[in-house]
Amino acid sequence: MPVCPQCRRRIAAWKLDHCVYCGAAFPPGFREGYPEPEALKWIERPELTPEAAKQLQLMKVVPFEQVRKPRSLVLALAGFSIPVFGVIFYLMYKLVYRYSAPAAVAIVLGGAFLVFYLVWRAVRFPGTSG
């Protein structure tokens, strides 16, 4: 098998006029004297339609940019909901503490877990970069 004159790798795509690894163009008559690989002898690939070829060319040229989701709205909602839940759980703690101290501690732990979860989800929101 012939190798690319620039990167010295074996030719991966026999019918292309350039190296698929480094992009170097092959000189004319580069494959002469070498037999076609066995795997390609029995394969006849259908030709691309002109529309599909045009789309492939556009995909090479046009960059795909991800749509950014509004992070400020999520952070505003998180900034509003975290203190609200903190106050709710504090008031529940004060109410329940009069009757049962262990239940009040359970409420504080549950509230702390919920507030931690809200902060964690706000930081890991899919529209954020990171």
Image (cartoon, rainbow, N blue to C red):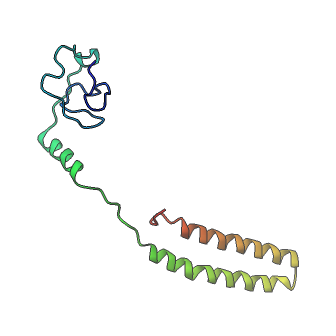
Number of numbered discs: 0
**On the picture, is 78 further left or further right than 128?**
right
Q: Residue at x 18, y 20 (%)?
A: 31
Work out which residue is located at the far front of the displayed protein and give it: 6
In the image, residue 51 sits, relative to residue 38, either above or below, namely: below
Q: Position of residue 9 (x, y in %)?
A: 32, 27
Please name whichever residue, 43 or 26, is drawn nearer the observer in this view of the structure: 26
Q: Position of residue 85 (x, y in %)?
A: 65, 80
In the image, residue 56 sits, relative to residue 6, either above or below, namely: below
Please name whichever residue, 41 or 23, is drawn nearer the observer in this view of the structure: 23
In the image, residue 75 sits, relative to residue 121, either above or below, namely: below
Q: In the figure, residue 17 lies in which quadrant? A: top left
Q: Position of residue 87 (x, y in %)?
A: 68, 85
Q: Quadrant of the N terminus?
A: top left
**On the picture, is 95 further left or further right than 40?**
right
Q: In the figure, residue 82 lies in which quadrant? A: bottom right
**On the picture, is 119 further left or further right than 38?**
right
Q: Position of residue 79 (x, y in %)?
A: 56, 80
Q: In the figure, residue 47 lies in which quadrant? A: top left
Q: Residue at x 87, y 83 (%)?
A: 99
Q: Residue at x 17, y 42 (%)?
A: 52
Please name whichever residue, 112 or 13, is drawn nearer the observer in this view of the structure: 13
